[in-house]
Amino acid sequence: GAVVSQHPSRVICKSGTSVKIECRSLDFQATTMFWYRQFPKQSLMLMATSNEGSKATYEQGVEKDKFLINHASLTLSTLTVTSAHPEDSSFYICSVLADEQYFGPGTRLTVT
Amino acid sequence: GQSLEQPSEVTAVEGAIVQINCTYQTSGFYGLSWYQQHDGGAPTFLSYNALDGLEETGRFSSFLSRSDSYGYLLLQELQMKDSASYFCAVRDGRGGKLIFGQGTELSVKP
C-alpha cells in the first residue's frame, strides 16, 4: 500500500482567512491524488482529482477558485481553502492512487 | 446519475456474522470496493471486487454480482473493534475515481 500523511490534523481559522492543507505520499510516487470532504455522519464527497504537473479536475458544484489545489511534486498535493466561511467547516481527507486508494488521516477544519 | 444504496445502520453481537449490502447505479463501473472508517479516522481499504464472485480476506469477505449491480461485505466472528462505518464505493472509470455510498454504521454489542 501507500502511506499518506496530512498536515495539519486540526486547524481553526477565522472567517475570511485562508488555510492550506498538505497531503504527502510518504512511500509512493503519486501521479494522482484525490481530495474529499466529509461532514459529520455523512459520506465522503469527492471534491477534485489532483494530477501532478497539471491542473486539478474539480467535481460539479465545487468552486475551483475557492478550493485551490496544487500538485507540484509526486509526493505533495496541497488544498487551500480561500476566504473560509463557517460552512466550510468539515473533515478534509486526501488519498493517493496506487493499486487502490490510500487515505490520509484527515484534517478537521473549523471556521469561526 | 450515479447512486449507491446501503443500509444506514446495522447492529449485531460479538461473535456473530453480519452482511452489509450495497446496490449501485453508475454510468461507469470498474469494480466495487469496501472501506472501513472509525469515528474521526481515515477510511481504510478492506476489499475490491472487479469480477463476479466472492473474495475472502480473513474474517471479511466481499461479493459482487455485476448483472444485479449488487455486492455485499460479510463480516464474520464480529469483534467490538469492528464497530465502525463501512462504505461501498464504485470505481468510476480508469482514472481511479471512487464514488462512495452513504455508509453503514455497524454497532457490535457484547
Image (spheres, coloured by chain):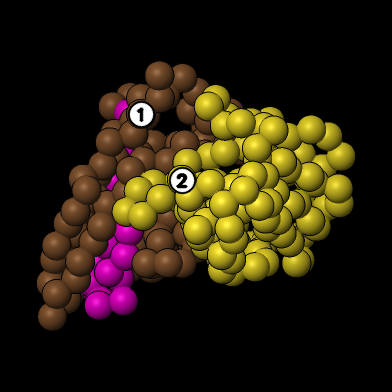
Colour for chain A in the figure = yellow
Position of the C terminus of chain B by quadrant: bottom left
Which chain is represented by brown in the image? Answer: B
Nearer the observer, B12 or A14: A14
Q: Which residue corresponds to mark 2?
A: A87
Question: Residue A9, image x and y in percent?
Answer: 59, 69
Under circle 1, the secondary element is strand
Q: Which residue corresponds to mark 1?
A: B3
Query: Label 2: few (<14), some or many (≥20) within 10 Å?
Result: few
Question: Residue B17, image x and y in percent?
Answer: 18, 64
Please give left or right for residue A64 compared with residue B93 in the image.
Answer: right
Nearer the observer, A13 or B21: A13
Amino acid type, residue under disc 1 in the picture = Ser
Q: Is residue B70 magenta?
A: yes
Please give left or right for residue A58 compared with residue B103 in the image.
Answer: right
Question: Residue A39, image x and y in percent?
Answer: 41, 50
Chain of the residue under the numbered disc 2 shown in the image = A
Q: Which residues are magenta?
A: B69-87
Position of the N terminus of chain B by quadrant: top left
Q: Is residue A81 magenta?
A: no
Q: Is residue A106 above or below residue A94?
A: below
Amino acid type, residue under disc 2 in the picture = Glu
Identity of the residue drawn at 36% across and 41% down: B101
Please give left or right for residue A35 compared with residue B54 in the image.
Answer: right
Gap between marks 2 and 1, in whole Å?
25 Å
Q: Is residue B87 visible?
A: no
Under circle 2, the secondary element is helix
